[in-house]
Image: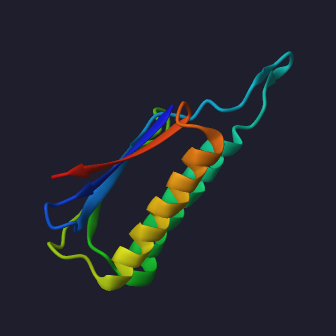
């Protein structure tokens, strides 16, 4: 299962997020394993958001990643992220919550954490 924790401060301002684990949605077959479409969708959503934050907006952030374990941590360095950052984060959260509802919380959980 993939767990995604969206980190906000007490004022509701995004401070970052982290993702842990692999969705394990794909069913095992006789000749191996099918591609995990849910894990791929999660990865595209998260990685695209990170790239857009970095390359299009120039948001200052610290990243920690481990592809093998499915771990990504993104911490915003600015105390108040830019409006475009808020828009992208809202879109990422919306997309991930939609995937969680569609495929099930046993594969993807999205949680909001106050920091």
Q: How is the image coloured?
A: rainbow
Q: Is residue 43 left or right of residue 51?
A: right
Residue at the image position 26 percent from the left and 72 percent from the top: 60
Q: Quadrant of residue 29?
A: top right
Q: Residue 44: x and y, percent?
A: 59, 57
The answer to whether residue 74 is visible is no
- Looking at the image, the residue that sits furthest to the front is 101
Q: Eyeballing the image, is 93 above or below 23?
A: below
Q: Quadrant of residue 32?
A: top right
Q: How many marks?
A: 0
Residue at the image position 18 percent from the left and 73 percent from the top: 78
Residue at the image position 53 percent from the left and 65 percent from the top: 48
Q: Is residue 105 left or right of residue 62?
A: right
The answer to whether residue 56 is visible is yes
- Looking at the image, the residue that sits furthest to the right is 31
User: Is 101 in front, or is 96?
Assistant: 101
Q: Eyeballing the image, is 78 above or below 15?
A: below
Q: Is residue 64 left or right of residue 96?
A: left
Q: Residue 77: x and y, percent?
A: 19, 68
Q: Residue 113: x and y, percent?
A: 25, 49
Q: Residue 49: x and y, percent?
A: 47, 66
Residue at the image position 38 percent from the left and 82 percent from the top: 84
- Looking at the image, the residue that sits furthest to the top is 30
């Amino acid at each position: 299962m993939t767990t995604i924790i969206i980190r906000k401060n007490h004022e509701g301002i995004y401070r970052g997020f982290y993702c842990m684990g692999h969705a394990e949605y794909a069913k095992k077959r006789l000749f191996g394993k099918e591609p995990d479409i849910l894990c791929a969708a999660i990865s595209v959503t998260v990685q695209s958001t990170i790239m857009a934050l970095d390359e299009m907006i120039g948001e200052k952030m610290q990243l920690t990643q481990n592809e093998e374990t499915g771990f990504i941590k993104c911490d915003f360095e600015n105390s108040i992220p830019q409006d475009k950052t808020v828009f992208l984060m809202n879109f990422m959260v919306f997309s991930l919550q939609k995937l969680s509802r569609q495929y099930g919380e046993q594969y993807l959980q999205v949680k909001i954490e106050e920091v």
